[in-house]
């Protein structure tokens, strides 16, 4: 297949593209940067560079300004929304223009769709939550669904917090523990619906092939945990002093809205549709994932 990947240079895309190449796919990456083509990968800075007869069979839509690592000012919130909605609209416009629309669009979304839900168990049929992240995901998903009118199968991959030793949330969350300070954030009772990056890559490859799957699909490990349980898995492997938890109000002062939306909010999300379709997670529980991530099984 010829697979177009937007945001293919990022944390997920940089691991996904080698997998797609390994599976024998031809890959085009949409990137704002200039990159040399090679190894079966072509880069475009605009989708206008793809001819009407480009023969794109599948699109994986990952591009968007990062949700963490920066304070959410009003201007940055506009950038987080616009970067996703504009890219997704451009993907749909390309699908419309192509002589043959892609058979599948796997578009990233996030479990932020469900908002802050305490210990309620959530699956793909659960209602949308409240807040900036939920509204962003709703609009991002609606933009992707525009391709359904063209006969394209649209999968909305609601990603959990993706963990890997090469970057993303695990590097941030585990840093205090590496310095010998064990702590959780806020009450520590909020649920973290995590997923190992290796399983995200395998799930994207699976979703490309599963012709019966469309609509929302949670991409989260089958066993979400509270922050306290994550801390316990880290402390089993790293020697730490019993540190003070970081109170929610301190996090709000330090980080602003992002603290409430991403770190103190919790969702207990299950990958019901992936599992029903027969997807086998390699990292099902947090202990095996943390063991691999720290190199201490
Ligand atoms: N990682 C997670 O834990 C997680 C969880 C839930 C959802 N997601 C979603 O999954 C997608 C991929 O995640 P990721 O962690 O791989 O993301 P990432 O590394 O932060 O970014 C993906 C790519 O988006 C492009 N990008 C960044 N800012 C942009 C902007 N202002 N306008 C247009 N493109 C921009 C960049 O590509 P170029 O610089 O090459 O243009 C970047 O490589 C994201 O949309 C993210 O929201 C991720």
Image (cartoon, rainbow, N blue to C red):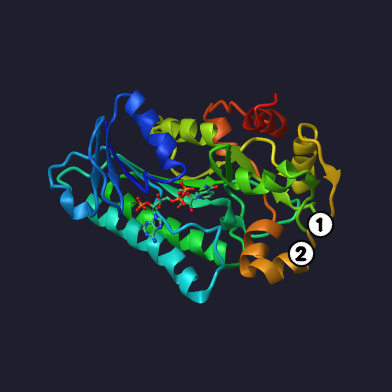
Could you tell me which residue is drawn at 64 percent across and 41 percent down? 270
Residue 271 visible in the shown view: no
Q: Is residue 254 above or below residue 237?
A: below
Q: Which residue is mark 1?
A: 187
Could you tell me which residue is drawn at 44 percent across and 30 percent down? 206
Q: Are marks 1 and 2 in contact (CB under 8 Å)?
A: yes
Q: Outermost residue toward the right?
A: 242
On screen, residue 227 versus residue 198, left or right, reads: right
Query: Which of the numbered marks, if any, corresponds to residue 288?
Result: none
Q: Quadrant of the C terminus?
A: top right
Could you tell me which residue is drawn at 38 percent across and 54 percent down? 145
Q: Is mark 2 within 8 Å of ligand 1?
A: no
Q: Residue 253 appears at what percent x and percent y? A: 70, 71
Q: Nearer the viewer, residue 111 or 210?
A: 111
On screen, residue 47 versus residue 200, left or right, reads: left
Residue 194 visible in the shown view: yes
Label 1: state its secondary structure. Answer: loop
**Residue 65, located in which quarter of the rendered image?**
bottom left
Q: What is the spatial separation of the Cα atoms under label 1 and label 2, in whole angstroms?
A: 8 Å
Q: Nearer the viewer, residue 88 or 246?
A: 246
Q: Is residue 196 above or below residue 263?
A: above
Q: Residue 4 appears at what percent x and percent y? A: 29, 42
Mark 1 / mark 2, whichever is N-terminal: 1
Label 2: state its secondary structure. Answer: helix
Q: Outermost residue toward the front?
A: 179
Mark 1 crowdedness (10 Å alpha carbons): few <14, some 14-19, many ≥20: some
Number of labels in the image equals: 2
């Amino acid at each position: 297949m010829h697979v177009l990947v937007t945001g293919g240079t990022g944390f997920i895309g940089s691991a996904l593209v080698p997998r797609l190449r390994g599976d024998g796919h031809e890959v085009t990456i949409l990137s704002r940067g200039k990159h040399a083509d090679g190894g079966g990968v072509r880069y475009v800075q605009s989708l206008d560079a793809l001819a009407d007869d480009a023969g794109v069979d599948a699109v994986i839509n990952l591009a968007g300004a990062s949700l963490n690592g920066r304070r959410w000012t009003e201007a940055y919130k506009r950038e987080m929304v616009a970067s996703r909605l504009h890219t997704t609209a451009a993907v749909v416009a390309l699908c419309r223009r192509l002589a043959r629309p892609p058979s599948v669009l796997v578009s990233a979304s996030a479990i932020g769709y469900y908002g802050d839900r305490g210990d309620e168990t959530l699956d793909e049929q659960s209602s949308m939550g409240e807040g900036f992240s939920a509204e962003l995901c709703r609009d991002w998903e609606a933009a992707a669904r525009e391709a359904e009118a063209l006969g394209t199968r649209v999968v909305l991959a609601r990603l959990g917090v993706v963990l890997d030793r090469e970057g993303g949330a695990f590097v941030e969350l585990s840093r205090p523990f590496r310095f010998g300070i064990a702590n959780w954030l806020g009450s520590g009772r909020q649920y973290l619906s995590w997923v190992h990056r290796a399983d995200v890559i395998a799930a994207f490859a699976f979703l490309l092939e599963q012709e019966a799957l469309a609509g929302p699909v949670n991409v989260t490990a089958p066993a979400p945990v509270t922050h306290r349980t994550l801390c316990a898995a880290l402390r089993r492997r790293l020697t730490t002093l019993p540190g003070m938890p970081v109170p929610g109000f301190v996090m709000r002062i330090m980080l602003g809205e992002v603290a409430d939306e991403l770190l103190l909010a919790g969702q207990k999300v299950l990958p019901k549709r992936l599992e029903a379709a027969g997807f086998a997670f390699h990292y099902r529980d947090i202990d095996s994932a943390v063991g691999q991530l720290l190199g201490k099984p």
